């Protein structure tokens, strides 16, 4: 088995018929039990991790995982992190001290996984573990083999019955924020969603949150009381004294910090990590160095400066709101009224029409509507449907100050099945002082990241 064969083997798990779905929805708890039985076959790597930080929440999970891992690495700890989904390449999902898993290591672990799956198929009556469950097991095996000091693990979906929640003990559980996403699975209110995410809280661990909603906090506090856990709510009293395309300088509790990521929402993610690092008695020098060195893929990631090309993974209205605010700040404060060109694609289960309305307020000069072609598990919105909806929105959008109605109507809108065609078309209209924003789906941005180059500049 080589790397390509190993990756194909994991992807092929999706073509197995799943009785649990064919017979109607079964309890999420059952899936967690299945995950535990599979890990039993693999020798229970989840029980061998010395220190664990578990990160749940609607927005900010990936950023918090990246910041904390970088801070712990700067503190001299061998730190593994697991994110979901991966930015572009599957091996980026698992990293140690900022370095992705090697192709060779990936192949060797998948070989072991395949042996375990064959044993599961022969000895168990339930469906084999899902693609995400198997990827979670890969991460646990990798971190144990590499003998990490800390593992920082991002929840895939929800928390209570997420595959990552088989972790028996945690030093810290984090709930970044609560928004209305995945409501069909987690519940139709923030309180119901908070209950599911609060399931990551285990007996006696420390709990940190950036959430401010009183009803949501009441849910988290109740869970903490039941688990004899200590809840700490971050304060966001900070001041920004410099913001450019190179990042943000801000002050928090009389200390100055710098983050490369764009958008003031990233300050809140950083502050949550600062509070956690201080609770772990990590020195300020290591905290500052970790934040400076942290790179946030697909979180307003700049991959070119001429024109300014930004890859962003916003895929729900809460995330899109901060994306739009950040682009408006760049447009008006730093780059002086340049044109914005959009490349957009959405997963079918997202509130894409609301995100279209949000993005339309950027008064784009062109909109390339496309889809991701790399994720077979995600049904996408037809690019033609996106284009038609944009045409309706743009036509009815009032002109912004200094702009004419004719300028808005002149917006070019086209649909493309191949995201690379969308990118090439957009480049034709993008002058040096323009912004190209790729957003709407982390899978679309991740795919174009591979075409544009996988490292920020």
Image (cartoon, grey):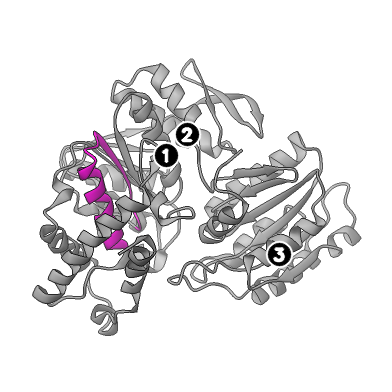
Inter-mark Cα distance, 3 to 2: 31 Å
Inter-mark Cα distance, 1 to 3: 30 Å
The kind of secondary structure element at disc 3 is strand
The magenta span reads 132-157
Q: Residues within 10 Å of mark 2 (few under 14, many from 20)?
A: some
Inter-mark Cα distance, 2 to 1: 7 Å
Look at the picture and state if 401 lies above or below 35.
above
Q: Residues within 10 Å of mark 1 (few under 14, many from 20)?
A: many
Which of the two residues, 423 or 33, is positioned nearer the viewer here?
A: 423
Residue located 62% across and 52% down the image:
452
The numbered dot on residue 66 is 1
Residue located 38% across and 34% down the image:
68
Indicate the quadrant containing the N terminus: top left, top right, bottom left or bottom right.
bottom left
Mark 2 sits on what residue?
A: 294
Labels 3 and 2: the sequence-earlier one: 2
Cβ–Cβ under 8 Å for marks 2 and 1: yes
The image quarter containing residue 51 is top left
- Coordinates of residue 97 in the picture (x, y in percent): 36, 35
Horizontal relation, residue 233 to residue 369: left or right:
left
Mark 3 sits on what residue?
A: 368
The image quarter containing residue 18 is bottom left
């Amino acid at each position: 088995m080589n790397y390509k064969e190993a990756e194909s083997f994991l992807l092929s798990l999706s073509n197995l018929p799943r009785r649990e779905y064919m017979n109607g929805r079964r309890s999420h708890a059952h899936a967690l039990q299945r995950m535990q039985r599979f890990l039993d076959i693999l020798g229970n790597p989840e029980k061998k991790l010395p220190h664990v930080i578990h990160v749940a929440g609607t927005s900010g999970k990936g950023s918090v995982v990246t910041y904390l891992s970088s801070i712990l690495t700067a503190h001299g700890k061998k730190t593994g992190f697991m994110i979901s989904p991966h930015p572009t390449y599957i091996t980026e999902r698992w990293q140690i001290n900022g370095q992705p898993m090697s192709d060779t290591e990936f192949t060797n672990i998948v070989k072991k996984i395949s042996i375990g799956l064959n044993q599961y198929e022969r000895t168990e009556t339930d469906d084999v573990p899902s693609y995400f469950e198997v990827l979670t097991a890969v991460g646990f095996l990798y971190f144990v083999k590499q003998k990490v000091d800390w593992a920082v693990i991002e929840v895939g979906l929800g928390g209570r019955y997420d595959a990552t929640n088989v972790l028996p003990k945690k030093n810290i559980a984090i709930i970044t924020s609560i928004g209305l996403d995945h409501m069909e699975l987690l519940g139709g209110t923030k309180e119901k969603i908070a209950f599911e995410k609060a399931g990551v809280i285990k007996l006696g661990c420390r709990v940190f949150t950036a959430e401010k909603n009183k009803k949501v906090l009441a849910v988290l506090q109740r869970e903490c009381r039941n688990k004899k856990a200590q809840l700490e709510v971050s304060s966001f009293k900070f001041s920004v004294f410099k913001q450019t395309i190179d990042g943000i300088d801000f002050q928090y509790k009389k200390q100055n910090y710098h983050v490369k990521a764009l958008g003031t929402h990233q300050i809140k993610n950083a502050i949550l990590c600062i509070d956690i690092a201080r609770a772990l008695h990590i020195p300020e020098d290591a905290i500052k160095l970790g934040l400076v060195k942290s790179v946030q893929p697909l979180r307003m990631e700049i991959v070119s400066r001429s024109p300014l090309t930004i890859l962003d993974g916003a895929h729900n209205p809460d995330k899109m709101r901060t994306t739009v605010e950040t682009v408006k700040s760049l447009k008006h404060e730093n780059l002086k009224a340049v044109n914005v060109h959009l490349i957009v694609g959405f997963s079918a289960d997202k509130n894409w029409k609301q995100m279209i309305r949000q993005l339309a307020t950027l008064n784009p000069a062109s909109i390339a509507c496309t889809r991701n072609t790399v994720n077979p598990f995600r049904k996408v919105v037809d690019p033609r449907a996106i284009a038609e909806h944009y045409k309706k929105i743009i036509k009815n959008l009032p002109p912004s100050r200094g702009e004419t109605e004719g300028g808005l109507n002149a917006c070019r809108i086209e649909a493309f099945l191949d995201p690379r065609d969308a990118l090439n078309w957009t480049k034709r209209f993008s002058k040096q002082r323009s912004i190209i924003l790729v957003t709407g789906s982390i899978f679309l941005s991740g795919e174009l990241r591979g075409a544009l180059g996988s490292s920020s500049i």
